[in-house]
Image: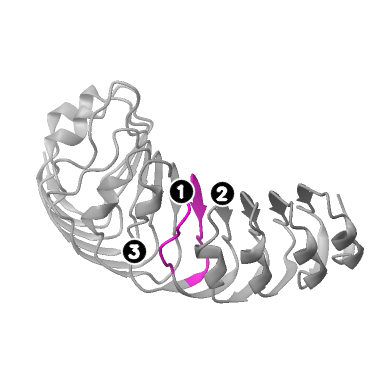
Amino acid sequence: NALSGPVPTCLGRLRALRKLDLSRNRFHGPLPPELARLRRLQKLLVSGNPGVGGPLPDWVGNLSQLRTLDLAGGSFEGGIPAGLFRLRSLRHLDLSGNHLVGEVGEFESPLAVLRLGGNHLSGTLPCLSASARSLTVLDLSANSIAGGIPTCISHLRRLSELNLSGNALQYALSPRLAFSGELQVLDLSANALSGPIPRRIAEASDRSGLVLLDLSRNQFSGEIPGEITDQRGLLGLFLSHNQLSGEIPAAVGNLTYLQVLDLSHNSLSG
């Protein structure tokens, strides 16, 4: 659509409203405080409105029945309200493409989708323990998150997409780090990760397997582990701009579904 102007305050009078979808319009200004009256609201969708922003209002964390909050592609700034971390009903949170700052804390709700990419978030990676059995998508890309990748990420047993690219992550990946057997997309590119590539980069699974593995633009060293070629469903393998050496595993030729292979800017042979 092409609706424009401020978000109407009169929407706050629709007390029975369960879903409010204003996405992909041309609204501007802050979310009006009148929306805090929508106590039955389960879905609030305002994505794709670049002019909607300002501080993320605290009252959002008081919408006790809210399950989906999508404010992607706006102009929100400041920190994530503490009430949002405590919102037990929340399952889907997308605040990507804004100007949010501060750290990513521990959410008390069992999230299924968490997208916070393209902000200015800092601190270290949370364990997201409450979402260990529910989280399928975790996207914290293009932020300023630092430190290492904690082994507690292994507890996210249903994760199918993990995107931590474009941060300030560093140190070697622990050999005890085993990602979900349901993982299909793993993007750790454009960080400062170092050391060898772990042989257990993903647990093989009969149900699924990696289709995209991007470890490019890091500081990984040593040889390419042959176990990567066990991921027979790979469509894209990106290991460029590292410090890898040794021979390219011959078993790469067994990746019959592979569409893109980028091993450039390393010290490989064979």
What amino acid type is highlighted by mark number 2?
His
Q: Residues within 10 Å of mark 1 (few under 14, many from 20)?
A: many
Q: Pick the residue in front: 191 or 104.
A: 104
Asked whether residue 104 is in view, the answer is yes
Q: Residues within 10 Å of mark 2 (few under 14, many from 20)?
A: many
Q: Is residue 208 above or below residue 237?
A: above
The kind of secondary structure element at disc 3 is: loop
Determine which of the numbered discs, if any, sits on residue 119 in the image: none
Determine which of the numbered discs, if any, sits on residue 125 in the image: 3
> Magenta residues?
104-120
Q: Pick the residue in front: 120 or 43.
A: 43
Q: How is the image coloured?
A: one colour
What separation in Å lies between label 2 and label 3 (alpha carbons)? 19 Å
Determine which of the numbered discs, if any, sits on residue 110 in the image: 1
Of callouts 3 and 1, the N-terminal one: 1
Circle 2 sits on which residue? Answer: 92
* 1 and 2 marks in contact (CB < 8 Å): no
Of callouts 1 and 2, the N-terminal one: 2
Q: Is residue 258 above or below residue 45?
A: above
Picture residue at 10% right of the left edge, 47% below the top: 223
